[in-house]
Image (cartoon, grey):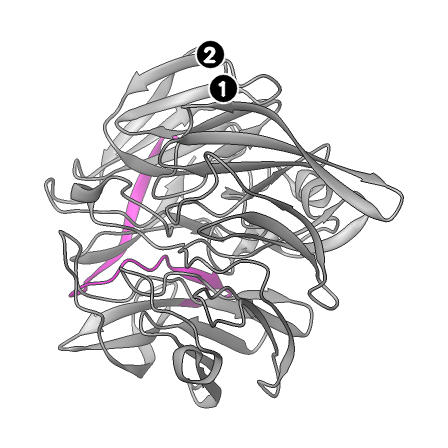
Amino acid sequence: MRTLPPSLKPAAVAVLAVGATLLGQVTGHTQAGSARAWPGLWGPARTGLAADLGNTVSAFKEVWRRPTTGGYSEVAVAGNQAITMELRGSDDFVVALEAATGKERWSVNLGPTYRGHGGSHDGPIATPAIDGGDIFATGPHGLLVALDASTGKERWRHDLVAEFNASVPKWGFGSSPLVEGQMVIVPTGGDKSRGLLAFNRASGKVVWSASHAKAPAYSSAVPATIAGTRQILAAAGDRVYGVSAADGKLLWSVSGPGIDTEISNSPVVLPDDRVLITNWQGGSMLKLSRQGDTINAKELWRSTFPRAANGPTIYREGFLYGFAGPMLVCLNADTGEVRWRERTGEGTLIGSGDHLLVLGLTTGDLRVVRATPEGYSERTRARVFVPDVVSVTGPSIADGRLFVRNIKEIAAFAVTQ
């Protein structure tokens, strides 16, 4: 999902298992090695959840820091490889770093950058996906590339605009590729677009396309097993829908007030076949159920909290934690009732066990906050960046290291427990 300029609120359309058990409940399968990897946008299952850090997080020790000249991509991590995208000169690049040292391994030029406007910054937006020996990345002009993870050698590419009639969203393509089995999936939009596209990950050939929505958006596709069916969820500019992962057949679709906006976060899948949708106006909880051969989507509640932000809304043990403008909020996931709110300032967050790791938009601070409905409880706070430099990129955490980024720096920290 893409991030928008802070001056244009929403500030995002970009962009730890409460254990593998929860990931299994949410996605229909466990994520092998999820404690040691953050393979793409929002982590192993696109829920913003990583491995449990335990109850004794006390500090973050800096391991390395390197300058960057622009870009909003998260840092995807697998093994000792950290993959991101950044602006260099006037071009955008996919960059491979050693996770332990920050040393560059290779870089691949994606062509001219998408220039920032209306308060946004130059540079790439989406987050690359790592899966085995493959890396998939989408540039802001719509170039989708498959790369060898070891060398960066290009295996195949597609121009989503020229080949599939996709329209470039106002702030450029921000949807991060999704790897689903032997496919890589990306959403596109526009009146003539072929919509959601699934490619064979090895050859780049189109497996299926699903043109169930037309309006462009920035959110990324999300995998889930819901109502007994493996499916791909997408939030377009005019509707939210699910398709069969096997062939792209439409399974369910929701449109209407609170849905038809391009500024939507990626859907967040919750236990009990529920899906949370957030945009800049607020959030809506859907319940999916099967009746014969049909899957129905029923709205359970709607609220002005939470809203679309730079990262996901986190689910833990029946409660939701996310941003509504400058407020960090906690809601009852069953009813939408607000349990507490705290004026932390805008930011992004991920979840790790019973903690939230909250990175401020301009404060430079990383907070460790208890994920509890009893009230806002801050355990510790660390200054990880110089204040007043914009950070709309969500943290990543893998193998005992936390990776954070703003528009000028990327840094890695070892978690002290």
- Residue 102 in the magenta stretch? The answer is no
Q: Is residue 252 left or right of residue 86?
A: right
Q: Quadrant of the C terminus?
A: top left
- At horizontal 46% and vertical 12% (from top left) the residue drawn is 339
The local crowd at label 2, few if under 14, some if 14 to 19, many if 20 or more residues have their Cα within 10 Å, is some
**Residue found 22% across the figure and 66% down from its top:** 123
Q: Dot 1: few (<14), some (14–19), or many (≥20) neighbours within 10 Å?
A: many
Q: Is residue 197 above or below residue 357?
A: below
Q: Measure the alpha-carbon separation of dots 1 and 2.
A: 5 Å
Q: Secondary structure at mark 1?
A: strand
What residue is pinned by disc 2? Answer: 339
Q: Position of residue 261 (x, y in %)?
A: 40, 45
Total labels: the figure holds 2
Indicate the position of residue 336 as horizontal and vertical percent values: 53, 19
Q: Is residue 1 visible?
A: yes
> Would residue 61 be counted in the magenta stretch?
yes
Q: Residue at x 26, y 54 (%)?
A: 411
Q: Tell me the magenta residue range.
A: 57-82
Give the number of the disc on residue 331. 1
The three-letter code of the residue at mark 2 reads Arg
Q: Is residue 51 above or below residue 141?
A: above
Mark 1 and mark 2 residues within 8 Å of each other at the beta carbon = yes
In the foreground, 99 or 26: 26
